[in-house]
Structure formats: structure tokens, C-alpha cells
Image (cartoon, helix red, strand yellow):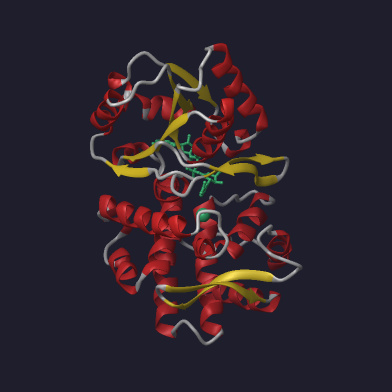
Amino acid sequence: MTESRVFLSDNPASWLNQFLSQKRYSSITVLVDDQTATHCYPLIRTVLPTHHIVQIPSGEEFKNLATCTLIWQKLTDRQVDRHGLMIILGGGVLGDLAGFCAATFKRGIDFLLIPTTLLAQVDASVGGKLGIDFNHFKNHIGVFQLPIATLVAPAFLKTLPLAEMRSGFAEVIKHALIDSLEAWKATQVQSWEKLDWKDLIQHSIQLKEAITRKDPTEKGLRKVLNLGHTIGHAIETASLETNQRLLHGEAVAIGLIMEAFISHQKGWLAKDDLTQITTYILGIFEKNGSELVIEAILKNVFQDKKNRSNRILAVLLKEIGKPEWDVEITAEEIQSSWEYYLSA
Ligand SMILES: NC(=O)c1ccc[n+]([C@@H]2O[C@H](COP(=O)([O-])OP(=O)(O)OC[C@H]3O[C@@H](n4cnc5c(N)ncnc54)[C@H](O)[C@@H]3O)[C@@H](O)[C@H]2O)c1
Ligand SMILES: [Zn+2]
């Protein structure tokens, strides 16, 4: 993969204006979903030269091959050639999906990512993973390809619903726990709604960029980014089978607590740190998911594609800022961490 850069800007329109003035693209196609068409497109419209818009419905259920076909068809109808640019203005769903379309259309055209959710700004838009869901398998088809650039502007977050903001914040917490005691302290000093977003976003991006640059295709180190996710994914999937669906970050927040508990049980993470992590996360997320049953969570843990030959592998914390990947955890440990979470 070639080098790509993430730019943080307070003024997305002026950044974009400057970016486009340095390039000579044969066409510009702007990808939006129904929400970003209303809330985000107006923030950049005035600086865009002649362009086409492709709008798709918002939601994970549209992150599939049928939507790709629609996008490729529109690009074909408009005779987009290999020198066209795709500007992707949306959350992680649109970024993964439209990025995949751009990376494969005529063997790849340039795409500029403009993430508009907190989750996409600190996580999905960094690291070059693109793709779609296939039948019931999440992110089953995809490629690694970096965008020509990524423009992160906190200004887009003003219209993001609170629940989505909080969901993205789980990844910010995860990044701090992986990174260092200092980062963790800086994250938990104030109430989360009043944080210095620009600083936190920048820090989160830097951490993910540094890790994915060292291990772009997830052979080893990059796995630390799955902290909270072995159990978090299982909880997310289990919640889809109930009528109280959890957002990704809400499930990851629970996963972070449970995996911190297992880290402590293994004799690694100190008791005080576990208590601090639990109290902080519960202060933001409340006791989500308590209607779930452990059997459903365990069933989904065993189906996770990251596990090998029926062993459950997770990222645990030796201490805050010292993650260890590919650590085997047992069904019993998950069960007691669930009991810990419920009684915390
Ligand atoms: N590629 C990666 O490395 C990576 C990492 C993490 C997650 N992901 C993927 O990201 C996806 C989740 O991303 P997400 O949480 O951003 O979901 P999303 O893209 O569905 O966005 C959430 C909701 O917010 C709306 N929205 C977006 N921006 C808005 C704004 N500024 N104002 C108001 N509403 C807005 C969207 O239309 C949608 O309804 C998943 O498909 C996941 O697999 C990818
Ligand atoms: Zn995640």
C-alpha cells in the first residue's frame, strides 16, 4: 500500500478547496447516504467544481454487493475513467463500501475519505480496510487499499446523534487503554461530552495509524486494536437476536470491561485499574445488554472468524498501555467476566 495521510481540519471546505486546486481529475463523484446528504454535504458543496452525486440509503443492511452494483453502474453510466476522483462523505458503512467500489472500479480510482461519524474518524477511516458484508458474514469480502487522503473535520460531528457519538467514543477509550497510562488519564479526566475532541481524535488517529503502518495486513501487532472486540462482537451479534439491539461501540464498551476483568483474573491488570476502567465506562454507557444470556454470547464467541480451531483468542492488558494479543481465554472466564459485569 502506498503512503496516505490523514488531515485534521477545522474548516473542511477550505481544506478541500486547496486539495482540489492541486489536482487534475477528469471527474468528481461524491458519495453520500441519506443522512450525510442533508447534514454534511452542505458544508462542502460550495467549493466543489462540477460533480455528480451518488446517494445510497444509510444503514449496515445496505453494505452489500447490491449497493456496490448500483455504484459501479452509476460510475459506468457517467463514463468515469481511471482519472476520476470519488469523494466519500459518510460514516464507516459508506467508507468501507464506497471505498471498496473505488478500489476495484477499473482496477482502482482515487478516493478521498471524509468520515462524518466519530467511529469513522478515529477508527474505520484509518488503516485501509475496505469491504462489504456477504449474506450474514460481516466484512466478508474486501481489500486493503488506502485513500488518496483522509480529511477529518470535527465540524461534521455536530449533527451526529448522541448514541452514535457515544458508540464511537468506545473506540477512543480502547485506543487510550492500548496506548499508555498517560493517554488513559487524559481521556478520563473530564466528562466525556466536554472533552477536547480535536485533541482526542488526533491522538486516536495517530495511534491507529502508527499501529497499522507497522502491520498493515494484521499479521500480528495490529491485532491489539481488537481489545474489547472478541467479547464485544459476540455481544453485538447476540443483541441483534433480541429486540434491544446494541450499537457496535455499546457492545465494545461491555467487551472492554469483561476483557479487563479477565486480564485481572490472570494476575495482570491491577485491581485498581480494573475498577477505574469499569467505573469510567459504566458512567458513560450505563448497564447495557443486561437482558442478554451468556449462552448466546458464548455461541457467538465460538463463531468469530478471528478464532482458530475452537480456541478463543483475545487481546488482554498486561497493564494499561501494555496489550498482549492472541491470548487464549476460556468459556468459564467469559462467564465469570459476564457475572462481574452484571454485578458491577
Ligand atoms: N474499515 C475499518 O477498519 C473499520 C473499523 C471499524 C468499523 N468499520 C465499519 O464501520 C461501520 C460502522 O460505521 P459507523 O458507526 O460510522 O456507522 P454508519 O456509517 O452507519 O453511521 C451511523 C449513522 O449515522 C449517520 N450519519 C453519519 N454521519 C452523520 C452526521 N455527521 N450527522 C448525522 N448523521 C450522520 C449515518 O447515516 C448512519 O445512519 C461498520 O460497517 C463497521 O464494519 C470499519
Ligand atoms: Zn470496533
What percent of the width, then of the height, locates residue 176? 38, 65
Q: Position of residue 37 (x, y in %)?
A: 42, 25
Question: Relative to residue 262, is residue 27 depicted above or below?
Answer: above
Instruction: Give the image quarter of residue 206.
Output: bottom left
Q: Does residue 289 lie above or below 311 as drawn? A: above
Vertical side of 92 occupied by 187: above or below: below
Q: How many marks?
A: 0
Residue 51 placed where, x, y %?
Answer: 40, 16
Question: Furthest-bottom residue in view?
Answer: 267
Res 10 → quadrant: top left
The residue furthest front is: 2
Q: Nearer the viewer, residue 124 or 298?
A: 124
Residue nearest the observer in this picture, 157 or 309: 309
Residue at 36% over, 56% down: 204
Which residue does the image show at 52% across and 12% down from the upper left?
Answer: 78
- Looking at the image, residue 206 sits to the left or right of residue 102; the answer is left
Residue 212 located left or right of residue 24: right
Residue found 50% across the figure and 21% down from its top: 54
In the rendered image, residue 310, in percent from the top left (x then y), is placed at 75, 68
Please report the residue visible at 55 percent of the width from the left and 65 percent of the height from the top: 220
Relative vertical location of residue 83 with respect to residue 327 in this rendering, above or below: above
